[in-house]
Amino acid sequence: MFHRIVKRQAMVYFFILLFPLFQMATFGNELIGEGIKESDQASSLVKRSNDVFRVQNGSGNYLSSLNKLLSVSESRGGLNLNPQVISSIGIKIKTHMAPGLQVSPKLLDALLEILSARGYKSNQIFIADRDLSSLIEAGFHLGVSGVSKYKKYNLFSSRNSQYYHDDWFHDSPMPPTLHDRTRFFINFPQDRNRRILEERKSYLPSLFFLKNVFWINLAVASDHINLGINGASANMTTGAISNYQRFLDRATIAPAAVTEILAIPEIWEKRAYSILDLSKFQFANGGQFDAEFIGRESTLLLSENPLSIDRFALSVINKKRIAKGFVARAEENLLLFKYALEIGLGDARKARIFNVQ
């Protein structure tokens, strides 16, 4: 039975330690995602893996590398990307630091080719990222008005009405940044009560989890002073919601927001795969692109758990930080992984990594 709760409000701090009990009390029955056969539930939704699969992509052949990763993951019980099992896929790309650091079009093209070869039609797949300006900078969006497409696939940003839904938001008393507060004043100049109400809300990217959609997360990695790493986990949470900057600027609230949003059952149970490309990453001064701190490693990572991917990507970032004279961001000190463990998103510290030939 698909379990939907209208106006989900995920409070950032108050339930971070009590979330497992809160989840049982509030969310009730275990979620079975709409759009996936009930007979496949045990292997594909409940027994999800924390393992990470790694392939060297030195030749830049994303199609071959991604095919290998998916084949090995699926052979070990990973979610089967098949239109008979999952009827609709939303691909979340990462472009907020484009064009300096972004998801490679070659990676996206390889994924689209694989899905097409498996029987997916163009109307069963869409691509999205929050900021239209970033999509334009990254070269995915042509900057023209009207219905946007990347090749033959629908391309969405938060400018599209389908991206958010009024009933799905993350509620927090954390005040907005000055920029966002100004935007709320412009939108509701005569309605103070509405402004106060909207300042608490961060709307969720509902197009990735409502109806029959499962999401694939294409990410790149950068250093982040409060998260430790801005990678796969952040891409689907603070990299997708509205009114987000208020969380990222705070050391304890940033990881709490990422994990709380990711733990919303309608989001968490609709994950297919996260894929992170380390061909270009930023190892210092994260938050904005800085060409001085760019590292490169011809590695592609895939996992069903975005936090597991972030853990291994962090080790690559830390290796580069140490080589360049920076202090490593110690994994054991990062709240991101601690909070994730406490609220039931798996123990990324125990995730295994498998090299794929």
Image: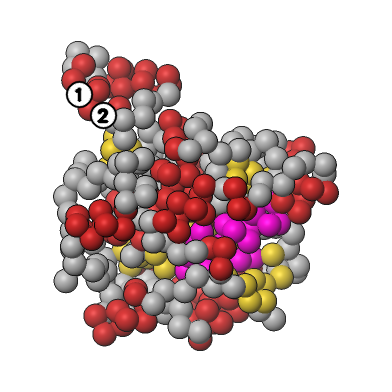
| Quarter of the figure that contains the C terminus | bottom right
The foreground one among 154 and 217 is 217
Q: Identify the image quadrant of residue 345.
A: bottom left
Mark 1 and mark 2 residues within 8 Å of each other at the beta carbon: yes
| Type of amino acid under label 1 | Arg
Q: Which residue sits at x=55%, y=44%?
A: 227
Closer-to-camera residue (240/32): 32
Residue 118 appearing in the image: no
Where's residue 98, x and y in %?
Answer: 59, 42
Query: Is 272 rendered above or below residue 232?
Result: below
Q: Which residue is situated farthest in the top direction here?
A: 190
Looking at the rendered structure, the secondary structure element under dot 2 is helix
> Could you tell me how far apart the alpha carbons at marks 1 and 2 are, in whole angstroms?
6 Å
Q: Look at the numbered disc 1 and give the secondary structure of its residue.
A: helix
Instruction: State the extent of the magenta-drawn residues as a range.
Output: 300-317
Q: Residue 284: horizontal and vertical position, in percent?
A: 70, 40
Q: Which residue is mark 2?
A: 198
Residue 298 is situated, as x and y percent measured from the top left of the image, at 73, 63
Residue 315 in the magenta stretch? The answer is yes
Dot 1 corresponds to which residue? Answer: 194
Amino acid type at mark 2: Glu
Which quadrant would residue 196 be assigned to in this image? top left
Q: Residue at x 76, y 46 (%)?
A: 321
42 lies above or below 147? below
The majority secondary structure of the magenta stretch comes to helix
For residue 165, side relative to residue 342 (left or right): left
